[in-house]
Structures are given as structure tokens and as C-alpha cells.
Image: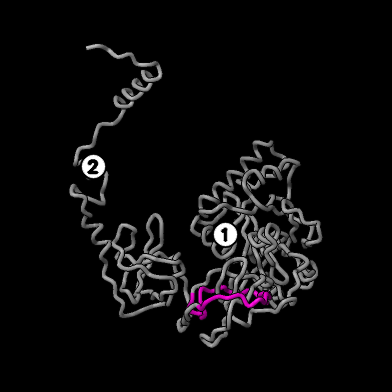
């Protein structure tokens, strides 16, 4: 038998393959394979534990709050896992009713529900709560009528006419909308089919303003809080003071936005509501919970600048970003202008990486601790992936050409301010 010549490249590949075989772990025995796959057995069938999880006893005789499916299609499963059998496929706007306690696995929060297709489990983030008596009418055929006006206030864009239809997105006041057909009466309201920059859907007719009736705001007030507590000082506001300020903002027509809205305005011309205000709190102290709850009580959204030592659980941080916006504030709250370039990169980028891992999305906004920065700090912030950054001072930010997206002005709210002084420094 002759020996065939093998080129050097082939010999190297052959040697690599032999080495890989020699170093590879031994094949698992059937017993070992079963131990490494606790969800199955030698026949590939689910274990009794998995079978029990996917066949729970659900009682639909006492139904709780009403929800609707908010995604195009949603699987109703026999148990709280993607490994459980699909009972039915639910279309968007299908009504589901809570019939038990939620269950959480590594990936999702599941809730047991009763539907017209039977009982089972669905993923919580794929449904929305609706009015108990809300209904959802059928979508008509959209045809451009030629009139383009605006939203007169913050309104929900729904998938169909009615309070029982899922919310596709929220439209700020001043969003251009084109009427696409006649109004539909449903749930005691008149609903307009509209086309918007964020998609097509239905809005209630009372939220529509005719062409030429909207004036863009001239400024945004970005308020900077730090701590909430009974002992007040420069960096601590009492709960009663915050509540008094929120009432004043509400009664004087201010509407809360978050940095996401400001970015969309700067990048795409997305409209802002009348008298926009960003209510931000720095440093992630435990009193953020008080700040969050008071804002929610008065219909405002919060912006939370969190360092990596924030006194909040990952679940709490994730929740804050669902109803407001979470932003970066460095790893350990250093004076960035006193650090080397490498030190700044670590403080800014590692903090963002930590937040991104919790939120599951890219954090867009950042605030400079103490308002300090050097000539290179802005470069570090931009290269880290942020889209906007906020200073600590300089008052209300006007849209008069002075706005620098990497140094947006803020208004410090001190515990020493009475309501009249607060109103004077916030008003524009």
C-alpha cells in the first residue's frame, strides 16, 4: 500500500483533528445522559415533574381582572413553560381573565387565564389590562380623507375602536395624525381611524385637534431631585414638598416626558406635549420608591439616574424602566473630570453594561455626577452608546439653538425651596 503525500496545510488540519478527538470528553452513558437532562428520560418522554407542571388544576369559576392580548398572536399553553403544550393560539384583542397567581421561570412571568378557547397560561408581558366593561369593535377599511391634524393631548393609539382594544402606543400631544375614515361609536365614545408616524390605529375623537391648532413648546424643564425624606436639606426633599410640587405641575398644565421622548424630538422631529417636564432623581437611594409612587399617583413618569450601587433590586430597576426611564450615572459616582481617560471609560461604560443587562435594552441617557466633566468625557459618553446626557445646573432648557444634546440643562430642586420659589424657577 502506498502512502499518499499530504500537504502541510492538510497535515496541520489532520493533527488538529486528532488532538481534538484526544482531548474531547468521553461520550456520556445513557444514565449520565438522563442525569444531565432532568426534563426527560431514556425514551425522551417528559418526567412526572414536567408532566405535573404542564397539567395544573385551574379553576375558572371565579374570574379576576380582564386583560386583552396585545401582540398579533399569543400561545395559550397548558402550563407555565414554553415546553408545555399549546392549547390554542389567541389573536390580538382576545379577552382573557385572570384565574390564579402568577408564576415566574427563568425567562417569563406566566399567569393562568380563562379564555373563549379554554384555560391555560400566557406570558404576562403579552397582555394588557382593560376596562372591565370595555369592548373592541371591528377595524374598518382605512382610506385617506386628506385632513391631517394633531393630537390635542396625550392619547392612546388602539388597535381598534373601543376601550377593550389593545393599546399599540401612546401619542404625545402635537403628534400629526391623518384621519383615514368615518368615526365609529363604541363604549360611549367616538373613535377616529388615523394614520400616525408611529403606525395606524384608532384614537378617541375628543383627542383630535384640527390643522394649525398645535404650537410646539419652547422649552423643557428637567428637574433634578436626589433624595426624599422628612429631614430636608439641599439634596433631600420632604414627601409633602414633592407632592405639593406635583400638584402645582399638574394644575399648571405640565406633562411629563422621559429622555426617550426628547431624543425622538431631536432626531426625528417627534412632537412633545405642551409644557414638557422631565422629573429626574439621581443616585438610586431607597427613597426612589417614594418618588416613584408619588409620581404615579399624580399621573407623572419618572427618570432615574442610577449608579451601580443603587439601593434597588434588579426587578425594581426593570420595573422603573417600564413606567418611566432608567439612565446611567457611573459605577461609583466619581468626579469624572478628575479621572484618566481609562478611568472615565470604566465608570461610564461598565455602569451602562450593568444597566443594559438588567433592562434587556440599550440605556439611552446619562447624567454627569456632580455635573463634572472634562474635555474628553463627552466622547466617552458617546462611545459608550448613550444618546443624550444631562448636566446638573443651568436652569430650564430652551429650544432656541442653545440645546447641546450632550449637556442638557437641569433645574436642581432643593429641600429649601418653598412652592413660590419652585414655581418661579420651573416656569417658562
| Quadrant in the picture for residue 27 | top left
Can residue 309 be seen here? yes
360 part of magenta stretch: no
| Quadrant in the picture for residue 401 | bottom right
Q: Is residue 140 left or right of residue 53?
A: right
Q: Which mark is residue 286?
A: 1
Q: Which residues are magenta?
A: 140-165
Q: Nearer the viewer, residue 360 or 103?
A: 360
Q: Position of residue 235 (x, y in %)?
A: 70, 59
Q: Position of residue 25 (x, y in %)?
A: 28, 31
Q: Is residue 340 left or right of residue 357?
A: right
Asked if marks 1 and 2 touch (Cβ < 8 Å), the reply is no
CA distance separating discs 1 and 2 = 47 Å
149 part of magenta stretch: yes
- Helix, strand, or loop for circle 1? loop
Q: Which part of the image, by quadrant, shows the C terminus?
A: bottom right
Q: Position of residue 164 (x, y in %)?
A: 48, 79
| Quadrant in the picture for residue 106 | bottom left
Q: Residues within 10 Å of mark 2 (few under 14, many from 20)?
A: some
Q: Which part of the image, by quadrant, shows the N terminus?
A: top left
- The residue at 76%/53% (across/down) is 404
- Helix, strand, or loop for circle 2? helix
Q: Is residue 316 above or below residue 139?
A: above
- The residue at 50%/56% (across/down) is 313
Q: Nearer the viewer, residue 376 or 426?
A: 376
Q: Which residue is mark 2?
A: 33
Q: Which mark is residue 154?
A: none
Q: Is residue 286 above or below residue 207?
A: above
Q: Earlier in the sequence, mark 1 or mark 2?
A: 2
Amino acid at each position: 500500500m502506498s502512502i499518499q503525500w499530504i500537504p502541510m496545510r492538510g497535515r496541520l488540519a489532520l493533527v488538529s483533528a486528532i488532538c481534538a478527538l484526544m482531548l474531547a470528553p468521553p461520550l456520556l452513558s445513557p444514565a449520565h445522559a438522563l442525569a444531565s437532562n432532568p426534563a426527560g428520560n431514556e425514551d425522551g418522554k417528559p418526567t412526572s415533574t414536567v408532566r405535573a407542571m404542564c397539567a395544573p388544576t385551574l379553576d375558572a369559576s371565579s374570574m379576576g381582572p380582564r386583560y386583552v392580548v396585545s401582540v398579533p398572536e399569543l400561545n395559550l399553553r397548558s402550563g407555565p413553560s414554553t415546553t408545555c403544550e399549546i392549547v390554542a393560539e389567541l389573536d390580538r384583542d382576545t379577552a382573557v381573565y385572570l384565574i390564579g397567581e402568577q408564576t415566574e421561570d427563568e425567562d417569563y412571568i406566566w399567569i393562568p387565564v380563562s379564555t373563549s378557547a379554554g384555560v391555560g397560561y400566557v406570558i404576562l408581558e403579552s397582555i394588557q389590562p382593560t376596562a372591565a366593561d370595555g369592548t373592541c369593535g371591528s377595524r374598518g377599511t382605512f382610506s385617506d380623507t386628506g385632513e391631517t391634524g394633531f393630537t390635542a393631548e396625550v392619547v392612546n393609539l388602539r388597535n381598534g375602536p373601543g376601550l377593550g382594544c389593545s393599546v399599540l402606543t401612546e401619542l404625545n400631544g402635537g403628534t400629526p395624525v391623518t384621519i383615514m375614515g368615518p368615526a365609529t361609536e363604541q363604549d360611549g365614545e367616538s373613535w377616529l381611524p388615523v394614520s400616525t408616524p408611529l403606525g395606524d390605529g384608532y384614537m378617541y375623537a375628543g383627542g383630535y385637534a384640527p390643522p394649525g391648532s398645535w404650537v410646539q413648546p419652547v422649552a423643557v424643564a428637567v428637574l433634578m431631585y436626589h433624595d426624599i425624606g422628612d429631614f430636608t436639606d439641599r439634596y433631600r426633599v420632604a414627601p409633602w414638598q414633592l407632592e405639593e410640587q406635583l400638584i402645582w405641575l399638574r394644575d399648571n398644565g405640565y406633562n411629563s416626558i422621559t429622555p426617550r421622548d426628547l431624543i425622538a424630538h431631536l432626531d426625528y422631529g417627534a412632537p412633545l406635549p405642551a409644557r414638557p417636564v422631565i422629573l429626574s432623581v439621581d443616585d438610586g437611594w431607597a427613597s426612589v420608591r417614594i418618588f416613584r409612587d408619588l409620581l404615579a399617583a399624580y399621573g407623572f413618569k419618572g427618570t432615574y439616574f442610577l449608579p451601580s450601587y443603587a439601593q434597588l433590586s434588579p426587578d425594581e430597576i426593570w420595573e422603573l424602566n417600564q413606567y418611566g426611564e432608567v439612565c446611567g450615572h457611573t459605577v461609583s459616582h466619581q468626579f469624572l473630570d478628575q479621572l484618566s481617560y481609562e478611568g472615565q471609560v470604566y465608570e461610564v461604560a461598565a455602569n451602562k453594561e450593568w444597566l443594559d443587562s438588567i433592562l434587556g435594552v440599550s440605556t439611552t441617557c446619562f447624567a454627569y455626577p456632580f455635573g463634572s466633566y472634562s474635555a474628553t468625557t463627552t466622547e466617552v459618553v458617546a462611545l459608550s452608546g448613550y444618546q443624550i446626557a444631562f448636566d446638573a445646573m443651568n436652569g430650564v432648557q430652551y429650544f432656541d439653538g442653545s440645546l447641546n444634546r450632550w449637556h442638557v440643562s437641569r433645574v436642581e430642586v432643593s429641600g429649601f425651596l418653598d412652592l413660590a420659589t419652585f414655581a418661579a424657577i420651573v416656569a417658562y
